Image: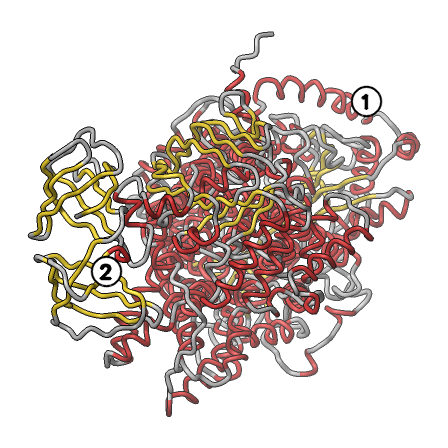
Amino acid sequence: MKKFIALLLCALLALTAASAFAESIADICAAGEALTHDELVEKALAEEGTFIVYGNTSRIVTAAENFGALYGIAFEGSNLKDAEIYTKLSAEIEGKAKGADMVMIQDGASLQSMALDTGYLVNFVPASVKANIAEGDQNPLIHQFINKVFIWNNKGENVPAITNVWQLTEPQFKGNILFKTPDAEQVNMNFLVMLTNEEWSGKLAEAYKNLYGKEIELGEFENAGYKWIAEFLANCSFGNSDTTLAEELSQETAAGKAGLFVLSKLRSSSVYTENLTVGQYVAAEVGTIIEPFSGFMYPMYALVSSNASRPYTAMLFIEYLMTADGFKPWGKSIGAYSTNTEIAPLDNDLPLSDWKASLVMEDPEYILDNYEDVYSFVTMYLQ
Amino acid sequence: MQNPFSAKQRAKLRAFFSKPANVILVVFCVLLCMLTLYPLIVLFLETITVHAGKEARAVKLTAGDFTLYSLERIFATAKNQYSKLTFYEPLFNTLAVAVTASLISIVFGGSVAWLITRTNLKFKKFISTVFVFPYIMPAWTLATWWQTFFKNVNAGAGTSNGIMAAVFGVNMPEWFVYGFFPISMVLGLHYAPFAYILIGGILRNMDANLEEAATILKTSRVRILWRITLPIVRPALLSTFLLVFASSMSAYSVPVFLGSPVRYYVLSTKMMSLINNYPGQGYIIAGVMIIFGVAILALNQYVTGSRKSYTTVTGKAAQISLINLRKANLPIAIGLTVLLVLVAVVPLLTFALESVIIKAGDYSLSNMTLDFWIGRNLTYLDQGDSTGILLSAKVIKALGFSLLLALTCSFFAGTCGVLVGYGVVKRRGSKLATIVNNLSFFPYLMPSLAFGAIYLALSTRVPFLHGFTVLALVGSVKYLPFASRSGINAMLQLSGEIEEAAVIVGVPWPKRMLRILFPIQKSSFLSGYLLPMVSCMRELSLFVLLVPTSNTLLTTMLMQYSEKGWAQFGNAINLLIIIVVLLVNGIVNKLTGASIDKGVGG
Amino acid sequence: MPEIILKNVTKRFDKFVAVDNLNLTIPSNSFITLLGPSGCGKTTTLRMIAGLETPTEGEIIIDGVTVFSSEKGINIPPNKRDVGFLFQNYALWPHMTVYQNIAFGLENLKWDKKRIRARVDELLAMLKIEEFEHRYPSELSGGQQQRVAIARTLAPNPKVLFMDEPLSNLDAKLRTEMRTELKRLHVDTDSTFVYVTHDQLEAMTLSTKVCLMEKGLLQQYAAPLDMYLRPANLFVADFMGSPTMNFLPAKTKKTGETSCELSFCGLTRTFTAGKPLASLPENVVLGIRPEFISIVSDSSIPASVYSTLPAGMETTVKLKLGGEIITSVVFGGIDFPVDSTVYLAFKGSDMLLYDAQSKKLIADGEIK
């Protein structure tokens, strides 16, 4: 809500001032890309003050703890919602208050329009790991991908066998699909927006034909993406937290229900994992896919704040996060995929490339251009 | 330099400012304008300004430009029924909930007030003590309790059964568990103590002779109630109605918990979901809520103003013969007790229970652990914290910060309340006093969320408004109404002569306040400190946008945990908050005699 | 000691005029009563002199010092005016003991402890409340509270003592007692007293001079007996005295320099004024105090008894005379039978003539 505010307020003066300010950190980061690990350590340890990290994943705090212990750096890690982070960034940077040094955040569209276009966050790719990261994941730097996939309860008589997403629009799933309400988490909305583009609406139309053996009838809908969104949302029961959804779906009483939420939530001790079936795992076993996608995937970015007071520490932390050690807090359970190609997926999970092939990925520019339209369309089905 | 004032004018000014009451009023008039009216202007500007991000993309303008886009979207966009779904329906829902909640609280609170003051009901002491609990406890307490208690597989996103379904095997229908009905019920129950305090106060002070006179004229009890008692408390009823209406309208946590699972939106929840992507539209909704607030203030002013003669009916606390409820006594008393236990005690037990079970819905002993309270190295839980809340450094830190903030807000709000009370009562009837009186009440009608949003916008303009400062400021302003109400009430009860007797012997003003006025009305004034403190401890929506991190305050931590789905830690923290609030209230009450009852005033 | 002068003092609350252009000189050492019905502006006047209320216009001088002047922009705060104020409701501070209540003002004047102790003891003795020293106001009776309030007011030895209906909350017996005490106190303390009351009897018995006000306007300012015998207008005449004066509509016909023919109640009599009658309107009101109408064994004025109210020491008799009900007070307890006929006489030279239109006193004299 918030970030925007600051933005406009200070539109003229602040923009010039902020960009001038940002440039210096941007310069440092640009120069930093040439530094070796040891040089980074040296410069980072020369910096003073508490190192502050914001992240919208709870495990960033653990990573910061490990990092702090490793180098003896005092830190403060905060787990915030993505929207909160943008708000705080703009308030801190426009208000010239001390704030984050480094930010780990999701929602590429907002990142682009609120933090990159405005210069609040600065990209940095550590030299030591650059070679192991795909070109496309480097600007802005993606630390890991996270997936939200179709999962269903495997108890009782009528266990669903989902091979095509159009099945989820059928009457038997009325009220039986658990999904975090898209206005509570941007990546969910981003996913829906992506479905309306040419590629995915085309694939959805095809999938429809494959399932029902006839051409899709769009009626009042613009394309197959809209039609699927409408019918899917109409079947959804909305929750406020993926953890809760995972817990609820894993109850014996949830027989016959399915969900679309973060795969890594299966790690929680209060989830009865034995009661759950992950769609893509099943598909992979029998050598098929869920048509045309088995969920969606979004990047988690790692960037330096333009008002960082410890920029080298931020860079060192980013370097650390990109290593196997730094990835540990996420890497120990399924559902998180490092962009460092040297870090292998867990044995009981699938490799990133498999997921990328079967999941809907974000395209920030498309999302920004079509957000308003899809947002108001989705609103209709949220009432 | 030429002095613009003549000697006579200067003398007049000097005379004016020689009275502390005038100085106070002028200072507060300026201060409150800055703290309430100026933010309103900022809010208004926000509604017609382009914000960076998706809004700027949609209008294809740069951030900071003027635009009517947000207004058009909110009020007049037919495509995808946008305006209807984003504004008009939530508005209707808001009004429906607010009206229903007000009626429930008046009927419930009013009847109990009448039973306590006018009948020989049994267990009076217990009932009157426990009855105010729901008001002291955070509003979401009842909401989450309602959810945990009644949820079942047939309602909303329900896939697990709550206590009602698991233990008693009763699946309540969806309308009972989520949406309009439970939101209205929970808000109604939460604010019923408000009605109880206001109406009970009038009934207690009302000269019993008024009713006795009717008794002697052989009027029946029912007729007395209908023709004498009700008309006399009518202004209090209306006042209660309006205040509960205003509070319910801006309630956020209750509709979040009980509305969103079935996509039942009210203005506050809609505003929260809009303000991230389309801040302009969010601010318009905030503005609409504020307009309603102002209308209510005006209406309340009109209602209480024009009938003041009624409400000031006071008399000797004469003995009134209590109505004998006879056979109905015990059933009513037991019914009320059970109900109060349900809404005030059972939630606490529920939270305690939910904070010790590992997997939801399984209430067997083998599924229980105290780890969420006192465990260490809880990595196996993978739920945000690795130590139980009582041992967790971050919980302790948040508790400390919450208490510090509560104390600070209470100090500033309470002290300003005393001063405003003094100034307004001393210069009663003057224009300035009326203005300050209204301004000091105004923050009450500002929805907390909107108020927080405005201060967030302000914090980017004012350099020192960060972290603790902005939290303390917004809390002090928001709770000033409670303090100024009790300040005014306390001063009204003091005859002016008490102070004049000290003026004559030359006691300077600060000493008069500290040595004479404050000690005499100690408990009333202290109530003005207590209510801000208690409210601050349990406040969420006001601070949620302004906290440096979610871990800063216990309440925001709780909200974060609940959003993350870390239910056990969440329940444990919730219980911790409630216990702290009840403890603070209890201790202050015991030590000083101040109580919440005295703080709430029309 | 000090003299208080009010010049053109006016107080307005919004549009309501509480005190209208009041001019008053309160001589040193006097005991002045501000008298009038409620809402007449007497309390406002008192509070303005004390400094608790700010006049809208005018000037107030106490002991030669201008304490307020709207012209010169002077407004000296109450505590610098060296005055004492006794409140109607005593305004004792409920959270302080009797001793603390009395001593508080003195501590404020930075007196040393011993001196305060001595002064408080002196006052406790003077007002006979020594045994209540450690009690709280709520533990005292009304009369005792009153004494504490007086002690507190007298403690700093004020030059001027203001009292706002201080006895109105006491019962009749205590009130009489306290009146005696106050009058005694006035002599003992050697200061100027300004006293507000709506009770004309209190004003009569206590004061050296009475200032009678109505609707913010000064009606008459005179010694009590002068005011009683020569009320300046019908309002004053009516307000002073109980039972009230008889007012009889009359017609005049001038017969000489100081005399005229007066017809009232079906009677025609000759009125002889003490001074020459300058102008004489035709319609006048004849005012006769009840004690100047005596009941005699035989006279040319018969009247029938309407009702008799014997009070022991004197008896008030209501009589019907020519269609009017008039009041007579006679000494001793006599119970006249209702409807019996008695004979009246107008005695003395304190019969008063008022202009029926302007309601002002025209002349005093005797009726033959």
Q: In this rendering, would B544 be left or right of A173? A: right
Q: How is the image coloured?
A: secondary structure
Q: Nearer the viewer, mark 1 or mark 2?
A: 2
Q: How many marks?
A: 2
The verdict on a common chain for dots 1 and 2 is no
Q: Between residues C281 and A318, which one lies in front from this camera angle?
A: C281
Q: Between residues B438 and C73, which one lies in front from this camera angle?
A: C73
SS under mark 2? strand
Confirm whether residue A113 shows in the render. Answer: no
**Image quadrant assignment for residue A74:** top right
Q: In this rendering, would A313 be left or right of B37? A: right
The amino acid on which the numbered mark 1 sits, given as a three-letter code, is Ala
Q: Looking at the image, is B36 positioned above or below residue B240?
A: above
Instruction: Identify the residue position indicated by label 1 in the image.
Output: A31
Q: Looking at the image, is B118 positioned above or below residue B50?
A: below
**Chain letter for the residue marked with disc 2 in the picture:** C
How far apart in space, not on screen, are marks 1 and 2 (Cα)? 123 Å
Instruction: Identify the residue position indicated by label 2 in the image.
Output: C294
The amino acid on which the numbered mark 2 sits, given as a three-letter code, is Ser
Q: Looking at the image, is B218 positioned above or below residue C267?
A: below
**Chain letter for the residue marked with disc 1 in the picture:** A
- Which quarter shows the N terminus of chain A? top right
Q: Tell me the crowding category of disc 1: few under 14, some 14 to 19, or many 20 or more residues within 10 angstroms, Cα based.
A: few
Identify which residue is drawn at 73% across, 29% down. Answer: A307
